[in-house]
Image (cartoon, rainbow, N blue to C red):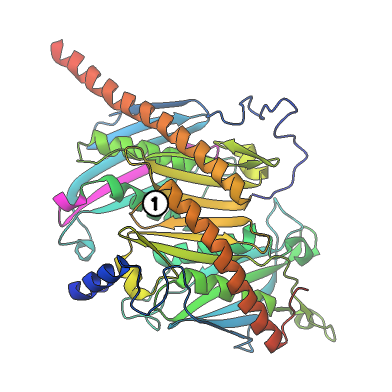
Amino acid sequence: MGGKSDIRLIDENGIRIDGRRRDEMRPVRIEAGVLKRADGSAYLEWGDNKVIAAVYGPREVHPKHLQETNRAIVQYYYAMAPFSVDDRKRPGPDRRSTEISKISAEALENVIFVEQFPRTTIDVYVTVLQASAGTRCAALTAASVAVADAGIPMRDLVAACAAGKVEDQVVLDLVKEEDNFGQADMPIAIVPKTGEIVLMQMDGHMTLDEIDEAMDMAIKACYDIYEIQKEALWKKYERLAEEEVV
Amino acid sequence: MRREIVSRLRKEYIASILAKGERMDGRRLDESRSINIQFNVTGSAEGSARVQIGKTDVIVGVKMGVGTPYPDSPESGVLSTNAELSPIAAPNFETGPPREDAIELARVTDRAIRESGAVDFDSLCITPGEEVWMLFIDIQPVDYDGNLFDAAEIGALAALMSAKIPYSRMEEGAEDKPLPVRCFPVSITAAKIGDSIVFDPNLDEEHLADARLTVGVDENGAVRAMQKGLSGGFTREEVGKIIRTAGVLGDERRRLLFEAAEEAGVPVPR
């Protein structure tokens, strides 16, 4: 946020640098059950973001002292592949990924019936293969499908999308240039059935009215994401059913 | 971090009076605990502050050194924020490298300070592309009774306000100059317990909290940073209400900060 640039991010017709309107999301495509060894998995493309998620569990907790006697713990590992960004990212967890992992685990915990699996862990691994802003939302959206694909009982999926501010206008789903040179970014994740907000961050500068507008925009987009998530899960079982017939 | 054990009786009692709109310590739901801010608590730091919010007690130090700028911003100083959750502050804090709680605390504090433009990083350039001032904010809680987020952030801001750029260390005879602070963001944290929203949660309330929201507001009422935590959710309306109340509480806390600064002879904006 807050960088300087001479690039016009929104032109006089209200069209953004990648051709989208203010309230338009990048195209999102999700495929469930893409990995063989994982209990559940998903692959997601969100504009130029490419993300893969694998889920294991409920399984035994290591180290043992992390286990909870009355519920499962959710461990989330967000990682960016070294080749996912322009300048190679040093592999391994850093402070940014640790924070993203923490709040994403908390968001998922909200929808997983953790109380049904005491003393176990549900491990969610998400790797960003190609990054163009909005990767924490893309990752959580994919992770949520992967958890469902693993057959882990859930109250609902979690759907995520960001809104922000670019050239004094509230916009949906910031792309890399907008994230770098824009004025604010606000990722949100909701539980669509209840409308509850389970992840929310913001940095930059927004007035109260702008925040209201951005929240409405992001929440509306989350419901569109939700449909794409459900579609991905349906498709997987349709595929399975066809294989059964043959 | 090991979890602390809280008796069920205590939890149930807190929840039962909250349902009536009351809190254990007699505060209103949207009332902050008393706050005490001291400046320049350590002479070895370029700037420092100690903040007590109720029984929560945090020391923040600012150190400055000369380093090389990032290649993509050759004329900007560098800010680095770190928090150390040492067993000094609570029996369940552990030694060792920062874990996720400490990292979150540091990053949320960092964002409020950085995104508001509180520090003019361009003014911290010494030789473009070669030498800039590095600014380190170190957060050291010494007593944890809930709401470290607010205490750390106001402490960081206070420490910055009292900081002097140590030119004398670079060049003999040079004079240290105050670090210019341009914006005064204040973090306000609310916790959701059942259906109640409480502001400035104490430790007991944090143990019971389902969800947490920290909002960084500046002196013009604009929001500069937000962070939602824990596994519970907020409704759209609750978030809107928290942001608006945060504006009011933020103004109040900023006023207390300026009063304390004035008393300590620390420069305050007019």
Q: Position of residue B27 (x, y in %)?
A: 41, 76
Please report, as a chain letter, where disc 1 is located. Answer: B
Q: Quadrant of residue B170?
A: bottom right
Identify the element where label 1 is drawn: loop
Residue A129 placement (x, y as % from top left): 46, 36
Q: Nearer the viewer, residue B25 or A54?
A: B25
Up/down of A131 relative to B34, above or below: above
Q: How many marks?
A: 1
> Residue farthest to the front?
B20
Question: Which residue shows up at 69% across the image and 88% down it?
Answer: B263
Seen in the picture, residue A185 relative to B145 is either above or below; the reply is: above
Say which quadrant the C terminus of chain A sits in.
Answer: top left
| Residue found farthest to the right | B173
Q: Residue at x 33, y 54 (%)?
A: B232
At label 1, the amino acid type is Phe
Q: Is residue A124 magenta?
A: yes
Magenta run includes residue A146 = no
Q: Is residue A172 above or below residue B52?
A: above
Residue B266 falls in image quadrant = bottom right
Residues packed near mark 1 inside 10 Å, few (<14), some (14 to 19) or many (20 plus): many
Above or below, B195 relative to B207: above
**Residue A83 visible (yes or no):** no
Q: Viewer-proximal residue, A74 or B189?
A: B189
Q: Where residue A32 appears, x then y in whole percent?
A: 31, 28
Task: Find the magenta span and give its range.
Answer: A114-133
In this view, the residue in front, B240 or B45, is: B240
Q: State left or right for residue A30 relative to residue A186.
A: left
Note whether residue A25 is visible: yes
Relative horizontal placement of residue B122, taking residue A64 as reference (left or right)? right
The residue labelled by disc 1 is B234
